[in-house]
Image (cartoon, helix red, strand yellow):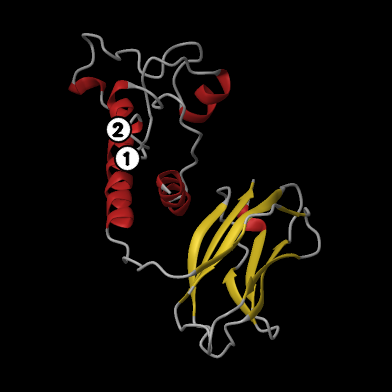
């Protein structure tokens, strides 16, 4: 959730990102991680050596540290990259607000399918089924649809919830600008017109070439 929040933010302002590997396990994070508290963050420079591709992408000199002054006497205010500091500060504020101010959803009855379903590249739609039984009346007006789809370019994906009677509820449209990976989200659907019991389906289609993925799991929470 932390990583997705940062990726979404930077995608929204058109700033490319890379997977951050430097911070995992370092002293600032370790005591939290060791007791099961999720950790995440942003990385722009430390002792890690910059590759030629990274130097071309971000500037600087290949074969040298991202921050040549890391833990050194030259690490003064003159060594601050004001652009990176400003962008990262905004991103952190956005993440704190997004992760800390979301609505509290009371627990409910969950119905889940954890079987993997491959999503063919630029192919036909696939479905994964959750069968709901033993309930009375209709589904709620705030039916929660939790989706975990692993994919290398989520902008290719169109995702629908299909009710037992065949009515489709669009959860996610495709978008050429949605360049991040994976769809890990909870959607709210007004399903009050649908009978609660029956075979509910998550329908996923990849509408563009060159990227692959699969439905990892999904669930309905009443």
Is 81 drawn above or below residue 202 in the view shown? above
Q: Residue at x 30, y 21 (%)?
A: 27
- Residue count near mark 2 (Cα–Cα under 10 Å), binned few <14, some 14–19, many ≥20: few
In the rendered image, residue 142, in percent from the top left (x then y), is placed at 44, 78
Foreground disc of the pair 2, 1: 2
Asked if the residue at tag 1 contacts the one at tag 2, i.e. Cβ–Cβ closer than 8 Å, the answer is no
Is 211 drawn above or below residue 196 in the view shown? above
Nearer-the-camera pick, 21 or 186:
186
Is 13 drawn above or below residue 128 in the view shown? above
Is 25 drawn above or below residue 166 in the view shown? above
Disc tally is 2
Please name the residue that numbered disc 1 is placed on.
Answer: 88
Q: Which residue is drawn at 28% across and 26% down?
A: 28
CA distance for labels 2 and 1? 21 Å
Sequence order check, earlier mark of 2 and 1:
2
Label 2: state its secondary structure. helix
């Amino acid at each position: 959730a932390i990583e997705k929040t940062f990726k979404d933010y930077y995608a929204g302002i058109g700033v490319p990102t890379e997977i951050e590997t430097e911070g995992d396990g370092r002293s600032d994070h370790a005591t939290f991680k060791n007791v099961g508290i999720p950790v995440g963050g942003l990385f722009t420079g430390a002792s890690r050596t910059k590759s030629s591709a990274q130097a071309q992408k971000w500037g600087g000199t290949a074969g040298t540290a991202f921050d040549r002054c890391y833990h050194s006497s030259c690490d003064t205010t003159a060594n601050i990259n004001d652009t990176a500091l400003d962008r990262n500060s905004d991103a952190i504020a956005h993440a704190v607000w997004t992760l800390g101010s979301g609505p509290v959803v009371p627990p409910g009855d969950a119905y889940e399918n954890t079987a993997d379903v491959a999503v063919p590249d630029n192919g036909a739609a696939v479905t994964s089924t959750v069968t709901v039984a033993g309930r009375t009346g209709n589904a709620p007006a705030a039916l929660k649809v939790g989706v975990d789809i692993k994919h290398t370019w989520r902008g290719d994906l169109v995702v629908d919830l299909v009710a037992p009677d065949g009515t489709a509820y669009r959860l996610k449209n495709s978008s050429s600008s949605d360049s991040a990976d994976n769809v890990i989200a909870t959607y709210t659907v007004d399903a009050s017109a649908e009978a609660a019991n029956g075979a509910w389906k998550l329908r996923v289609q990849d509408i563009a070439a060159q990227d692959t993925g699969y439905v990892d799991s999904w669930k309905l929470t009443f």
